[in-house]
Image (cartoon, rainbow, N blue to C red):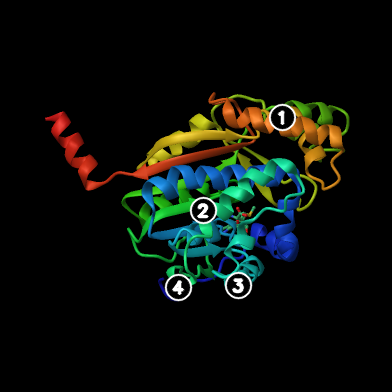
């Protein structure tokens, strides 16, 4: 890591500093339990299994959800985050790794649909001996100015809406592309603009915005042209000064291409489950009938291969390697 990089002080860092001690409880809410189970499974199937990256940078690592996942598959992981308190929690958890790796990655099974994920995690990570693992290293740093030399990492992870929280997100993408080795991969997740929940948001805004905390003017801005551009809204309810950028699949695809990252695969998450208004799923005491419907929708969402609009956009992208450049040179001759 480069020396003497000033720790960032951003609205987002202050926001996450405040919630750091309780952040891991979001795994107990059905909305996030499903989101993280789905993301982690996609990471395993599309990054860990085919590429087995040895060196991983987790940008906006928070308390380390994905850092521990990569480390549990024997990668050397560095996690950086703007929030000193989130980094403190991640470091406390790192002290329990690898002995507690199963527990660190198991999502509380309050919801039956999480059990297959937990079983899968146990099967895949219980096989190794503790001395085969490297504890992730966590540090405070700014995603807009990554303190690493060019071409340092095999893989970069950027999940949990980091891009949506940084208004200068093109800088973050450029930094990710810079620190990736040629041929290196990126797993990116960001907030989607077009999704079923938008209809509920608009209806709620018309009725006063009590459930989604979004005034009509902002809700309307989300459906204005241009349809492939990102829109920025106030973070609902909590910090008025914190802004959230919502991306479209096509727009983010273009942004990735612009920094030299080629999209290999992409998915949406909460594309069918958002038939249910999201505030109903952001709580622990979800009524049984709604939980049952959620379970059916989640099951269908995982199996329907259509790129439906969804609340989260996930991408696997790859930086061009010398081999690709050689091939494209040959092709154009
Ligand atoms: C929703 S959390 C996601 C954490 C983790 N990746 C996860 O999936 O649980 C978003 C994180 O982004 C971090 N963040 C926001 N702006 C950042 C920036 N400019 N540089 C680094 N981290 C940032 C926040 O501090 C917060 O921990």
Mark 2 or mark 1, earlier in chain: 2
Choose top left, top right, bottom left or bottom right for residue 281. Answer: top right
Q: Which residue is mark 1?
A: 296
Distance in Å between CA atoms under marks 1 and 4: 41 Å
Q: Which residue is mark 3?
A: 96
Left or right: 224, with 173 as reference point: right
Q: Quadrant of the C terminus?
A: top left
Distance in Å between CA atoms under marks 2 and 1: 26 Å
Ligand 1 rendered quadrant = bottom right
Q: Residue at x 75, y 33 (%)?
A: 294
Q: Quadrant of the N terminus?
A: bottom left
> Where is residue 40 drawn, in percent x and y?
56, 48
Pointers 3 and 4 in contact (C-beta within 8 Å):
no
Q: Residue at x 71, y 29 (%)?
A: 296
Choose top left, top right, bottom left or bottom right for residue 189. Answer: top right
Mark 2 or mark 3, earlier in chain: 3
- Secondary structure at numbered mark 2: helix
> Where is residue 284 drawn, in percent x and y?
82, 48
Quick check: is the Cβ at mark 1 less than 8 Å away from ligand 1? no
Distance in Å between CA atoms under marks 3 and 4: 14 Å
Choose top left, top right, bottom left or bottom right for residue 84. Answer: bottom right
Visible residue check, residue 234? no
Crowding at dot 4, Cα within 10 Å, few <14 / some 14-19 / many 20+, comes out as few
Mark 1 or mark 3, earlier in chain: 3
| In-front residue for pair 95/119 | 119
- Secondary structure at numbered mark 1: helix
Pointers 2 and 4 in contact (C-beta within 8 Å):
no
Mark 1 or mark 4, earlier in chain: 4
- Secondary structure at numbered mark 3: loop
Q: Which residue is mark 4?
A: 131
Left or right: 201, with 62 as reference point: right
Q: Which residue is mark 2?
A: 124
């Amino acid at each position: 890591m480069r020396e003497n990089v000033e720790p960032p002080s951003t609205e987002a860092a202050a926001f996450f500093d405040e919630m750091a001690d309780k952040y891991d409880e979001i795994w107990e809410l059905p909305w996030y339990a499903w989101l993280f189970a789905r993301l982690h499974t996609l990471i395993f199937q599309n990054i860990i299994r085919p590429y087995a990256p040895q060196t991983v940078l987790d940008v906006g690592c928070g308390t380390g959800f994905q850092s521990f996942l990569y480390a549990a598959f024997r990668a050397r992981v560095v996690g950086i985050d703007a929030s000193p308190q989130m980094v403190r929690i991640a470091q406390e958890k790192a002290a329990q790794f690898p002995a507690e790796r199963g527990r660190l990655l198991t999502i509380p099974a309050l919801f039956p649909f999480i059990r297959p994920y937990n079983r899968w995690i146990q099967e895949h990570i219980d096989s190794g001996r503790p001395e085969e693992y490297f504890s992730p290293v966590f540090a405070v740093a700014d995603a807009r100015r990554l303190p690493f030399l060019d071409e340092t990492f095999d893989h970069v992870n950027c999940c949990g809406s980091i891009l949506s929280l940084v208004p200068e997100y093109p800088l973050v993408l450029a930094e990710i592309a810079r620190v990736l080795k040629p041929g290196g991969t990126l797993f990116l997740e960001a907030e989607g603009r077009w999704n079923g929940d938008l209809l509920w948001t608009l209806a709620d805004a018309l009725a006063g915005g009590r459930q989604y905390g979004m005034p009509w003017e902002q809700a309307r801005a989300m459906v204005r042209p241009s349809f492939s551009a990102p829109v920025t809204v106030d973070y609902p309810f909590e910090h008025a000064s914190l802004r959230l950028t919502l991306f479209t699949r096509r727009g983010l695809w273009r942004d990735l291409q612009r920094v030299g990252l080629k999209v290999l695969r992409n998915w949406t998450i909460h594309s069918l489950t958002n038939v249910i208004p999201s505030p109903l799923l952001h709580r622990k005491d979800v009524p049984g009938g709604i939980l049952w419907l959620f379970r059916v929708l989640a099951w269908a969402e995982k199996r329907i291969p259509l790129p439906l609009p969804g609340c989260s956009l996930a991408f696997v992208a790859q930086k061009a390697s010398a081999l690709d450049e050689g091939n494209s040179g040959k092709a154009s001759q």
